[in-house]
Amino acid sequence: MELKINQQTKIFNAETLSVQSLLDLEIPHKQNGIAVAVNNTVVPKNKWNEFFVQETDDILIISATQGG
């Protein structure tokens, strides 16, 4: 499966991936303070396990940072 994540094309050896599975692969150690949008639509955190990405989806993963 080919996906575009944060402007980079990545290939995954899977036929189906939920948003949660994708995050487990991409950022396994940090999942608090994360927002995910698929094709410019925000996916609420409570839907990550049931929202499945499709081939060639454009995914944006945003991580909150501290600072001031």
Image: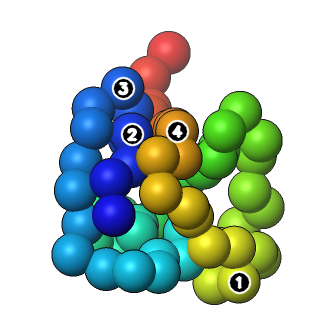
Q: CA distance from mark 1 to mark 4?
A: 18 Å
Q: Earlier in the sequence, mark 2 or mark 1?
A: 2
Tell me whether circle 3 and circle 2 mark residues in contact (CB < 8 Å): yes
Mark 2 is surrounded, within 10 Å at the Cα level, by few (under 14), some (14 to 19) or many (20 or more) other residues, namely some
Tell me whether circle 4 and circle 2 mark residues in contact (CB < 8 Å): yes
| Residue 57 shows in this picture | yes
Residue drawn at the location 75% of the way across and 46% of the way down: 42
Q: Earlier in the sequence, mark 3 or mark 1?
A: 3
Residue drawn at the location 22% of the way across and 56% of the way down: 11
- Element under disc 2: strand
Residue drawn at the location 47% of the way across and 46% of the way down: 56
| Residue 64 shows in this picture | no
Q: Quadrant of residue 39?
A: top right
- Element under disc 1: loop
Front-most of residues 1 and 42 = 1
Identify the amino acid type marked 1.
Answer: Glu
Q: CA distance from mark 4 to mark 3?
A: 8 Å
Identify the amino acid type marked 3.
Answer: Gln
Left or right: 8 as drawn, with respect to 68: left
Query: Would you place residue 58 above or below residue 21 in this image?
Result: above
| Residue 58, numbered label | 4
Query: Would you place residue 41 above or below residue 2 in this image?
Result: above
Q: Which residue in the protein does label 3 denote?
A: 7
Q: Quadrant of residue 9?
A: top left
Q: Which residue in the protein does label 1 denote?
A: 50
Percent x, y of residue 22: 40, 69
Tell me whether circle 2 and circle 1 mark residues in contact (CB < 8 Å): no
Mark in front: 1 vs 4:
4
Q: Which residue in the protein does label 2 denote?
A: 4
Q: CA distance from mark 2 to mark 1?
A: 20 Å
Q: CA distance from mark 3 to mark 1?
A: 24 Å
